[in-house]
Amino acid sequence: MKPLKLLFSLLLLCLFACNLTSNKNADKSNGNVDTELEQQSKIDSSSIEITVERGAFHYDKFVLKDTLITFYPPKKSIGIGIDNSNYNQISEQVISTQTRNNLVKKILNDGFFKLKNFYASNTTCNSHLTVTVKFNNQLKKVISEDFDRECPELLKFIEQEVIKMHNKELKRILLPG
């Protein structure tokens, strides 16, 4: 009788284990229905890099890598040029992970990776804006010949947010002309 009891116990244990495994698989498949936003909340900081390059009278760039924003002035005019010396020296600003994640989520939700690669301008007095985003094995560079006209709103937003987060007030200087 004992062998029959043992066999019955093993059979119940096997059924229980199979049922548990199938419930876990069902939970995982339901987990795959997570929205893109929920998946993005698990952001790998080593995979994030956002570069904003400005043209015209700036020719500078801001690079957000992980939670550090670094401003790089134009190579030719470090220490000279624009009156405000903040525009002529490399500077860094650390931001919170939450702030960075909010920016990345906005960029992804607003379709940065669906934008065209190039936006031409029909005017002659232009100042380009180039935004490059590296995120989770995706890399996209979007160039707009004019940061003001014919430029996607998302590019303008990214430029303004990165400058604001950098916190040194290095906004575009518009010269008459």
Image (tube, rainbow, N blue to C red):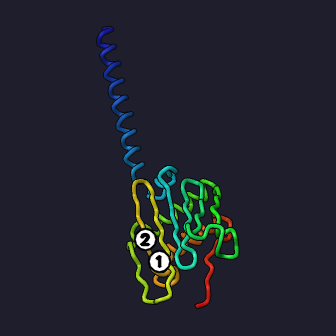
Query: Between residues 119 and 24, which one lies in front from this camera angle?
Result: 119
Task: For label 2, count other residues whose C-alpha is less than 10 Å away and answer few (under 14), some (14-19) or many (20+).
Answer: many
State how many labels appear: 2
**Which amino acid does the dot numbered 2 rest on?**
Val
Foreground: 46 or 81? 81
Closer to viewer: mark 1 or mark 2: 2
For the residues bearing labels 1 and 2, Cβ distance under 8 angstroms: yes
> Please, what secondary structure does the residue beneath circle 1 have?
loop
In this rendering, the answer to whether 151 lies above or below 164 is: below
Label 1, label 2: how many angstroms apart (C-alpha)? 10 Å
- In percent of width and height, residue 98 lies at 60, 56
Residue at 39% across / 44% down in the picture? 28
The residue indicated by pointer 2 is 142
Name the residue: 35% across, 34% down.
Answer: 19
- For label 1, the residue is 152
Give me the residue at 64% from left, 61% from top: 91
- The amino acid at mark 1 is Pro
145 left or right of 87?
Answer: left
Q: Secondary structure at mark 2?
A: strand
Asked whether 175 or 105 is in front, the reply is 175
Please state the horizontal and vertical placement of residue 53, each as a whole percent of the image.
Answer: 51, 69
